[in-house]
C-alpha cells in the first residue's frame, strides 16, 4: 500500500510505506504559553537569519519521537504543484511553499527542508519552511489570507496527480483560533497515514511546517513553535 505526502509532486518526492508506527510530541511551549516565545519577541529578520530558524535533525527527531530522521532535500525557491491538484483554490491547504499561493504577497526569500528516515519504508516525513517578508504587516497579511483558505477547504477531499502517482486526501476542519494555524489531512486508503500542517507569522517571517506519520497529532504545531523560538534568538 503506497502512502504519500501532500508535497509528493514537488522535487522533494518522498513516499512512505509503513504501518503500526507511533510518534510522540515533545513538550514544546507554544507562543503565548509559559516558557514559549511571544510573537512580539521575534526581531526583524534578514535573509541570512532564515537558515537558523529551521530546526536541526536532532530537534525534529525529538518532536517526532524518532531517531533516524535527517535532511533529505532542501530548496531556496517556491514549488509549483498547481497542475496536480483537483482544486487549485485549496492548494495552500494541501501544500507548503507554493509559488501560486505566495504570489503577490511580496515574499523576499525562502528556506525549505524535507526531513525523513532515509529508507524506503520511512515512518515519518517532515517539511519545514521559513519565508522572509519585507515587513511584519505583509507576513501577517499572508497568514490571515491563509486562514480564510484553510477554513474554506476544511471538510473537502483533494486529489493529487503527478506522473504515475495518485492519492486522495481528506482535509479536516482547521483550528484557526490561535497564533499557530493547524489543519490535519489524511490519505484515503492508506492505513492511517496523515499529516498536520501548521502556519504562523512573527515579525517579518512566516513559518510553515508539515509533519506526517501513521499517528499524527500536534507535531507540526510543535515544530512551528520551535522555529519561532529559533527566530527569537537573533
Image: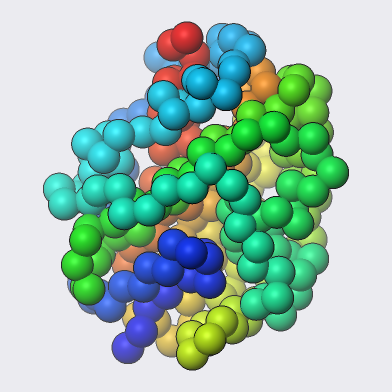
In the foreground, 230 or 200 = 230
Instruction: Answer above or below: position of 208 versus 55.
Output: below
User: Residue 221: percent from the left, percent from the top?
Assistant: 47, 41
Residue at the left extreme of this rendering: 67
User: Residue 223: percent from the left, percent from the top?
Assistant: 41, 38
Task: Indicate the quadrant where residue 87 lies.
Answer: bottom right
User: Residue 131: percent from the left, percent from the top?
Assistant: 61, 35
Whether residue 218 is visible, yes or no, is no
Q: How is the image coloured?
A: rainbow
Whether residue 110 is visible, yes or no, is yes
Q: Residue sitting at 35 percent across and 58 percent down?
A: 125
Q: Residue sitting at 66 percent across and 55 percent down?
A: 98
In the foreground, 123 or 192 = 123
Task: Please state if 95 lies on the left or on the right of 16 as rendered.
Answer: right
Instruction: Answer above or below: position of 113 versus 173.
Output: above
User: Residue 216: percent from the left, percent from the top?
Assistant: 38, 58
- Counting the numbered discs, the total is 0
* On-image quarter of the N terminus: bottom left
Task: Please state if 78 lies on the left or on the right of 111 as rendered.
Answer: right
Task: Indicate the quadrant where residue 13 lies.
Answer: bottom left
Task: Please state if 61 lies on the left or on the right of 90 as rendered.
Answer: left
Q: Residue sitting at 79 percent across and 66 percent down?
A: 89
Task: Please state if 110 lies on the left or on the right of 218 as rendered.
Answer: right
Instruction: Answer above or below: position of 181 versus 56.
Output: below
In the foreground, 116 or 64 = 116
In the foreground, 36 or 62 = 62
Instruction: Answer above or below: position of 117 versus 51.
Output: below
Residue at the right extreme of this rendering: 104
Q: Residue sitting at 76 percent across and 38 percent down?
A: 142
Amino acid at each position: 500500500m503506497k502512502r504519500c505526502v501532500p508535497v509528493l509532486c514537488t522535487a522533494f518526492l518522498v513516499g512512505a510505506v509503513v504501518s503500526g508506527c507511533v510518534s510522540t510530541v515533545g513538550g514544546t511551549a507554544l507562543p503565548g504559553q509559559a516558557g514559549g516565545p511571544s510573537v512580539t519577541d521575534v526581531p526583524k529578520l534578514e535573509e541570512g537569519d532564515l537558515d537558523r530558524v529551521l530546526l536541526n535533525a536532532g530537534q525534529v527527531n525529538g518532536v517526532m519521537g524518532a531517531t533516524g530522521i535527517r535532511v533529505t532535500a532542501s530548496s531556496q525557491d517556491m514549488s509549483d504543484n498547481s497542475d496536480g491538484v483537483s482544486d487549485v483554490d485549496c492548494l495552500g491547504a494541501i501544500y507548503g511553499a507554493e509559488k501560486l499561493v505566495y504570489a503577490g504577497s511580496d515574499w523576499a526569500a525562502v528556506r525549505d527542508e524535507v526531513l525523513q528516515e532515509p529508507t524506503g519504508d520511512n515512518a515519518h516525513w517532515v517539511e519545514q519552511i521559513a519565508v522572509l517578508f519585507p515587513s511584519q504587516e505583509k507576513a501577517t497579511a499572508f497568514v490571515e489570507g491563509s486562514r480564510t483558505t484553510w477554513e474554506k477547504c476544511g471538510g473537502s477531499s483533494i486529489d493529487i496527480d503527478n506522473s504515475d502517482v495518485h492519492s486522495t486526501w481528506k482535509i479536516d476542519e482547521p483550528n484557526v483560533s490561535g497564533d499557530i494555524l493547524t489543519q490535519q489531512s489524511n490519505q484515503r486508503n492508506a492505513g492511517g497515514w496523515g499529516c498536520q500542517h501548521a502556519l504562523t507569522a512573527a515579525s517579518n517571517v512566516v513559518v510553515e511546517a508539515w509533519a506526517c506519520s501513521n499517528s499524527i497529532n500536534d507535531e507540526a504545531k510543535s515544530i512551528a513553535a520551535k522555529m519561532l523560538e529559533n527566530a527569537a534568538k537573533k
